Image: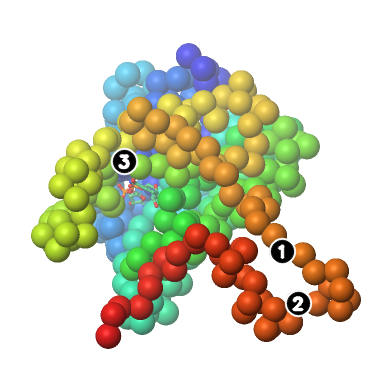
Amino acid sequence: MNLQGKAGIVTGAGRGIGRAVALLLAKEGASVVVNDPGFGRGGEATEEKPADAVVAEIQAFQGRASANYSSVADYAATGRMVAQCVDTYGKIDFVVNIAGMLRERMIWNMTEDDFDQVIAVHLKGNWNMCHHAIKVMRGARYGRIVNFSSDAFKGSVGQCNYAAAKAGIIGLTRSIAREAGRYGITANAMCPMAATRMTVNDGVIAGWKRRLERGLLTQAQYESRMAMPGPEFVAPMVAYLCTEESRDINGQLFHAERSMIHTYQFGEEARAIYKYDDGGMFSVNELIETVPASLMNGIPNVAPPDEQ
Ligand SMILES: NC(=O)c1ccc[n+]([C@@H]2O[C@H](COP(=O)([O-])OP(=O)(O)OC[C@H]3O[C@@H](n4cnc5c(N)ncnc54)[C@H](O)[C@@H]3O)[C@@H](O)[C@H]2O)c1
């Protein structure tokens, strides 16, 4: 067991990827605060208490777990969640921020509330948890943070709120890594792919069928989406990032799914143009003339205008 004696929190652990991560961390010997208020896919309150079921599953194999029902968007409640972990298990070694929801609309239809709620749960929620936990971890000079981003950070139609939050989580994680690394704390982020209610449900499947019929998806792409692997394939990399052995992995981003884990190359200088005369100032005319054939050579418009 690789996490014997460790303790920490998994947010959004009542379902999907969070549940799979909480179960594996507990199987690896960790004591786990299983956080989940049981929200619906759009972040709406429900009567469900999925955290209780996950705690029961962990206790069934003699693992140690306790439930927490707070929203990660609530600053004060996340402070109490960290205190619950410390009070119950005497310490907090890891926080895995998985809680999430969606409010999908094109930007021209998206309400201010759609934007604010998604930012509150994902970006602010990650910050809330990291802020409170790292205050304690810093004193212990040890900690592991695993935040959940998404490949949506690259840009995702109908999800500009979510994509912005998930891109923000990468910047948050990389900053925390630099700030807290000297105290023995690592912070890394995951971009998972797994079949959950978030990714494979009746509405999503209907959308894929429509795109297949309109020739926007190939049969192979459609079939691979329908066969999306389960969340259990994401959990081992997360558990690894919670171990002592991952001490030198800090400020990194990983994609994980069945059969593949990969890193990303981004944020590095890729192409450049230079100007040394005229005090180093490009003119707009120069940019009109040079950018298409230099910086943007071979790079297409991601969504060109429809033919009139
Ligand atoms: N499934 C994928 O392929 C995929 C891809 C990219 C990113 N992600 C990210 O992974 C994470 C988990 O997604 P999932 O697919 O397991 O979704 P899911 O809907 O199955 O599970 C999310 C859980 O988070 C909980 N939750 C929602 N709002 C919360 C809040 N304010 N506080 C605490 N808990 C809250 C929900 O109750 C739910 O149980 C999310 O952050 C999601 O954005 C998932």
- The relative height of residue 70 versus residue 14 in the rendered view (above or below) is below
Position of residue 168 in the picture relative to residue 308 (left or right): right
Q: What residue did someone put label 2 on?
A: 282
Mark 1: secondary structure:
loop
Q: Position of residue 71 (x, y in %)?
A: 43, 56
Q: What residue did someone put label 3 on?
A: 194
Give the class, few, some or many, for how many residues have Cα within 10 Å of label 1's Cα (few <14, many ≥20): few
Which amino acid lies under the numbered mark 1 shown in the image of this protein? Answer: Ile
Q: Is residue 151 visible?
A: yes
Taking the spot 33% from the left edge, 68% from the top edge, the residue there is 158
Q: Quadrant of residue 183?
A: top right
- The relative height of residue 213 versus residue 33 in the rendered view (above or below) is below
Q: Is residue 23 visible?
A: no
Q: Position of residue 139 (x, y in %)?
A: 74, 37
Taking the spot 65% from the left edge, 56% from the top edge, the residue there is 271
Taking the spot 31% from the left edge, 56% from the top edge, the residue there is 39
Mark 2: secondary structure:
loop
